[in-house]
Image: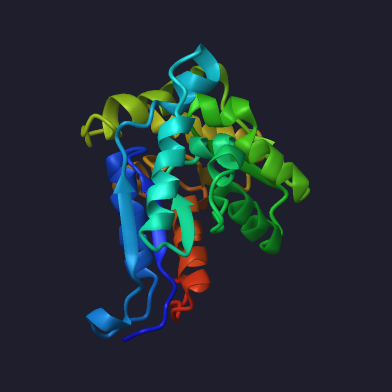
Amino acid sequence: MNSFKTIGIIGGMGPLATYDLAEKILDNTVASCDQDNIPVIIDCNTRIADRTAAILHGGADPRPEMKKSAKRLEEAGADVLVMACNTAHYFYDSVCEDISVPVLHMPRLTAQLLLSKGVKKAGVLATDGTCQSGVYGDALEKEGIEPIYPSQEKQKIIMSLIYDYVKAGRMDFSDLDIDAVISEMKEKGAEILILGCTELPVAFGIIGDKGLPAVDPTDVLARAAVSFAGAPLKDVQQ
């Protein structure tokens, strides 16, 4: 029996992103048999209200259900929690209030990684809620990195990609001018893209390389969780 700590995933934000995170935890762990893997508990709580709607439009408060998920995971034996949603980190402090186990912070971990790579300007692709709440802006600026955001017109393309396509299960993105978004980010001086919504790595895995390096915060979080659990971490693929 292994002695790894148990990871708890506050999921349902959205369901596809939840299992993408779980898969990345698996993919980043060195394992040759079932018992070499980390115990993971998933609470795919689809009752959690939309985070962007709550932040920007007075929508239903997602915090009660997020806190319920955190408590359930702690009581089920999780030693560390992760959230499969970037925008949800706006409510990070509330999630941490009633539990005693740590919660890893995806935007801060991502900013720290970019700092280690010498990045000075990072393009943030994310929901309106993530962009306007400063979840990534604050984390990046704390590390001395300038956040670069799409124009209002290009942001609409990203929101459609997230909500009208990936969340809706539509994986043909030919109607969306993603190239225009990437070109704008380059023109503004972005050295790297942060795929700052957990649906975006799913989309870009299909879209492919668009000529600007990208970092997947979900993968950053997964690797941090594997390390926290005490399991051997796979080398980063070059």
Position above or below: 93 against 228: above
Looking at the rendering, which quadrant does residue 185 occupy?
A: top right
The structure residue drawn at horizontal position 48% and vertical position 48%, both measured from the top left corner, is 211
Position above or below: 32 against 23: below
Position above or below: 186 against 55: below
The structure residue drawn at horizontal position 44% and vertical position 79%, both measured from the top left corner, is 231
Give the tally of numbered discs: 0
Residue 56, position as x, y percentages in the image: 54, 17
Residue 111, position as x, y percentages in the image: 65, 52
Say whether residue 174 is visible: no
Looking at the rendering, which quadrant does residue 23 occupy?
A: bottom left
Looking at the rendering, which quadrant does residue 174 occupy?
A: top left
Residue 91, position as x, y percentages in the image: 56, 35
Position above or below: 123 against 236: above
The structure residue drawn at horizontal position 42% and vertical position 62%, both measured from the top left corner, is 78
Say whether residue 194 is visible: yes
Instruction: Compare residues 19 and 205 and report the one nearer the observer.
Output: 19
